[in-house]
Amino acid sequence: MRRFLCTLAAPAAAAVVAFAGGPASAAIVSLDVAGVVNALGGTAGTFGPDVAVAGTVQFDTAGAAYQTGPYGDGAYAYYRPISGSFQIGGQAYGFGPSGALSVVDWTTDSITFFDSSTVVGPTTGGFDPWYLALSFNGGPNTVAGTALPASYESLAGLTPYFSLYFNGGYSASLQGYLSVVPPASAVPEPASWALMILGAGLAGATLRRTRQAPPLTA
């Protein structure tokens, strides 16, 4: 995927958390991810050898591509993600105005959320965030042409690869596979619980009155 981004880096262009997994509406898809990645190129002294990462990316399935072109014997398209943010070592990192979402239809299809120049996040221990990416790679039928995936389920079964490079190069980085976190089971709000309990109570009272009513006589 790095080769693809380097090849197309010149025109690469532009985009924080809604809810736990699944689409927010018919068009918006939100994916929560989490896991532990490796600290490479001297970053372990600052972040530790094993770094916990948790984040969310979002895109609009009805979004329009702002750039397309050939890639090998396939094709690619760039879209704008709605948002992307990650918690790493108690610090927040996310996509800036140059954040993009690439869809590659080739031998190995891929959907990659990335920002290669305007990453938002702190400089920690001398490591200035530069390139941030979350890539979902799959077989040749992962995407239909260069159209965006149509649903949450389209990506939820894949294992995304996380990358955060520092200081304008590829030597110092945090990298590794994350897992898609399934949507949390819906938990009723306190007001909903109160209504449910009240409803159950009324149903019980009605049932008791029905049982105690005298039989009808002709």
Image: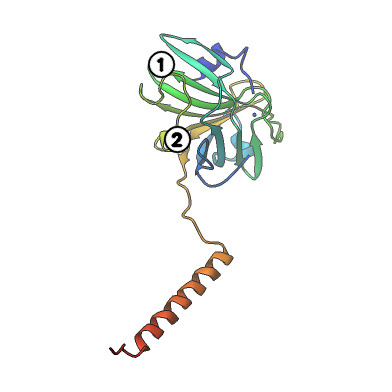
Q: How would you rate the neighbour count of disc 1 (Cα within 10 Å): few for under 14, some for 14-19, many for 20 or more?
A: many
Would you name the residue on which mark 1 appears?
106
Estimate the x, y position of residue 108 in percent, counting from the top left.
Answer: 39, 20
Lateral position of residue 63 relative to residue 213, left or right: right
Badges 2 and 1: C-beta atoms under 8 Å apart?
A: no
Judging depth in this view, the residue of 202 and 72 nearest the camera is: 202
Q: Position of residue 167 (x, y in %)?
A: 67, 24
Judge by depth and name the residue closer to the eye, 18 or 25.
25
Of the image marks 2 and 1, the number of the one nearer the N terminus: 1
Residue 158 spot, x, y in % from top left: 41, 34
Q: Which residue appears farthest toward the left when viewing the image?
A: 218
Q: Where is residue 117 in the image (x, y as percent from the top left)?
A: 67, 22
Q: In this view, does 205 lie above or below 60?
A: below
Q: Which residue is drawn at 41% across and 33% down?
A: 154
Tag nearer the camera, 2 or 1? 2
What secondary structure is found at the residue carrying circle 1?
Answer: loop
Q: What residue type is labelled 1?
A: Trp
Total labels: the figure holds 2
Residue at (52%, 17%) from the top-left corner?
Answer: 77
Could you tell me which residue is drawn at 37 percent across and 83 percent down?
210
Residue at the disc numbered 2: 151
Look at the picture and state if 201 lies above or below 63. below
Label 2 is placed on what type of residue? Ser
User: Toward which corner of the image does residue 59 lie, by quadrant?
Assistant: top right
